Image: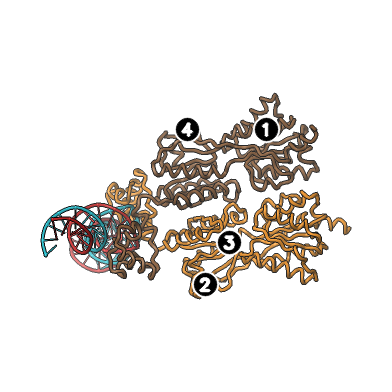
Chain colours: A orange, B brown, C cyan, D red
Amino acid sequence: MVTIRDIAKRAGVSVATVSRTLREPEAVRPAKRDAVNQAIEEMKYVPNAIAQQLRRPRHEAIIVIVPEIANPFFSEIVQSIENVAHELGYRVLIGETQGKQERLDYYAEMVTSRVADGLILLGSLLPSVVRATVKAGKPLPIPLVLACESYAGLNCPHVGIDNVAAAKLAVQHLIAMERKRIATITGPMVNSLCADRLRGYHSAMVEAGLTPEAGWIVDGDFSIESGHTAMLRLLELESRPDAVFCANDEMAIGAQQAIHEKGLTIPDDIAIVGFDDLRFGAYASPPLTTIRQPTNELGETAMRMIDAMLHDKPLTEQSVVLAHQLIVRRSSGAQERLASNK
Amino acid sequence: MVTIRDIAKRAGVSVATVSRTLREPEAVRPAKRDAVNQAIEEMKYVPNAIAQQLRRPRHEAIIVIVPEIANPFFSEIVQSIENVAHELGYRVLIGETQGKQERLDYYAEMVTSRVADGLILLGSLLPSVVRATVKAGKPLPIPLVLACESYAGLNCPHVGIDNVAAAKLAVQHLIAMERKRIATITGPMVNSLCADRLRGYHSAMVEAGLTPEAGWIVDGDFSIESGHTAMLRLLELESRPDAVFCANDEMAIGAQQAIHEKGLTIPDDIAIVGFDDLRFGAYASPPLTTIRQPTNELGETAMRMIDAMLHDKPLTEQSVVLAHQLIVRRSSGAQERLASNK
DNA sequence: TCGCGTTCTGGCAACGTTTACAAAAATATG
DNA sequence: CATATTTTTGTAAACGTTGCCAGAACGCGA
């Protein structure tokens, strides 16, 4: 391995000069600078980043922790984090927990052990170190930004949407489509955002004077399959719903499939609304009405927040709530209704 | 920051003893070991991974480079790499290139600068350093494993499937379904695997005595949208095809949508076969016949190969070709044909 | 109790950088 | 041309570990 010392020798200068040529070239006389650069070129020198990091206080690296990379919703956020990170000069490490606390802690330790400067957390689990903090009411042990989920009692920068309002909007849309028997397929209730979405559902129902019947609230786990099985259960109900609000698009796609299998049609027999606005939802059959989360802004904001924390810039807001949006497509019956109104 | 020296002082031992307590506890007397562990506990010491890496020859970290994380095909491979990596004690960094050479080189430099030990490359671009190697006929400058794509003339471990045979199988299936006017939507031709798939298409056609008409071969870029627009072009043809082989599932999903929009039905009017076996394909309408790539094995094999390279274990095979599989669902008309045969 | 072989322990030199400080060289000033 | 000032350079001390080596402590048999 060729080191800075080899370059110094070859160029006939001191190591300090080599280092300076790399860090602040203006500070070194052109003649030497050229000699150094030439030596670097000739010997194909690449500075050892590990050694640099040992000396420097900052590494300009962050970790993004995702429950599941293969989930397009998360990977789209990651993608936008990557873009901004690059622009701000950060390196991005991605860790996948698959819902395991052990893995999460493993990645969190990468910031206590100085591999990275900070953490962006997508998903519902908290690292053990942080969890201890919450209980003790202490400040955060590591620079952390929460994207998507927020935790009561944890004083931590956060970016997300208003899930209660968003879910409510989705259900209100179904109500506006003159559906009355509205069911919901929820995500795993350990996630606070699932609880929020369920709350939004209830709130919309109550305000419209509708009462969810027994069996209209079914648990899913965010997977296509769980949406499928949940829908099958709803279809077996005596009091079959005429609309379903799904807590994410993947479950909505699974639900659509189940409806087709039973020979029913969407939206005539049952209207569907999803959540997330996955790329694939627009190409489902029929195209899925959904709530769009601004994945780009989510990622970008999270990245800018962690950058601010790491550089002690004041955060303008501790908690950023971004706008969601109802995307109306055919699965909720809007077109049909429009047509029949004419 | 609390260092190994602080612990040594607190526990009344030397730094060497602390280090040993961490690395090989059996080698230190239980009394001291306990004192050290207690000090570590009390002071919440976490070893500085950067400093460790500076001393150690290996970091047990690899980089996986993906063109696009949000592409489920890639993210599923990444997921299985992560799993095996974890088991083998590696840390995984993920880099996304978005097709940009500059970004790719940036990540590749992370291994020359010792941030990671090796590289797993998904996608078609090669890092500049490696490209230089190919020309010069030199050995690889960095430990590298190619997943998916392979390069003629580059002597580099590789895992993938036989794309020519897989594409051929897909088209032969359409031929077996008694389709004669078979078109194809290709991926970007810079990828060697797209060229391979096109070759497989041709080969199947020629062997069956069929000749692709002008306009039956349309370019896509692997995105849903490009599948959609490509299909629209096919539908405008005088000699409209009665089947389409798409080089990936996303384009197939886009194509299905286009067909529906024109009021045609799948598979009666046009049969569709995709490639990759995305989760979403099984829930498309109708469910998509496709070629399954073994993403799990792909990731696992790639990870085991790079591990072998890094630890100088002999590679049993320089190039591993995994089995693909035809997954027959309704989009290719197999069921319909079965029914009418009775 | 002594001597000897083992097992443990501590001191210290790396690892490859960056950077404070001092020294040297270049430049400006009179 | 000497001196003062500024710019450029080199020396060496960090950064936090690990692991070699020498020496200390221990255990055991006589």
Q: Nearer the viewer, residue D5 or A59?
A: A59
Q: From the image, which quarter does the C terminus of chain A lie in? A: bottom right
Label 1: chain? B
Q: Residues within 10 Å of mark 1 (few under 14, many from 20)?
A: many
Q: How crowded is mark 4: few (under 14 residues within 10 Å), some or many (20 or more)?
A: few
Query: Disc 3 vs disc 2: Cβ atoms closer than 8 Å?
Result: no
Residue B219 visible here: no
Q: Is residue A53 above or below residue B102?
A: below
Residue B161 visible here: yes
Q: Earlier in the sequence, mark 3 or mark 2?
A: 3
Of circles 2 and 1, the one toward us is 2
Name the mark on residue A123: 3
- Identify residue type, mark 1: Val
Q: Are marks 3 and 4 on the same chain?
A: no
Q: Name the residue under label 1.
A: B171
* Image-quadrant location for residue B167: top right
Q: Which residue is drawn at 57% across and 46% down?
A: B74
Give the secondary structure at mark 3.
Answer: loop
Label 3: chain? A
Query: Disc 1 vs disc 3: Cβ atoms closer than 8 Å?
Result: no
Apparent side of residue A84 relative to residue A259 in the rendered image (left or right): left
Q: Do labels 3 and 2 share a chain?
A: yes
Query: Disc 3 vs disc 4: Cβ atoms closer than 8 Å?
Result: no
- Between the C-alphas of marks 2 and 4, the distance is 57 Å
Report x, y in % for residue A219.
68, 61
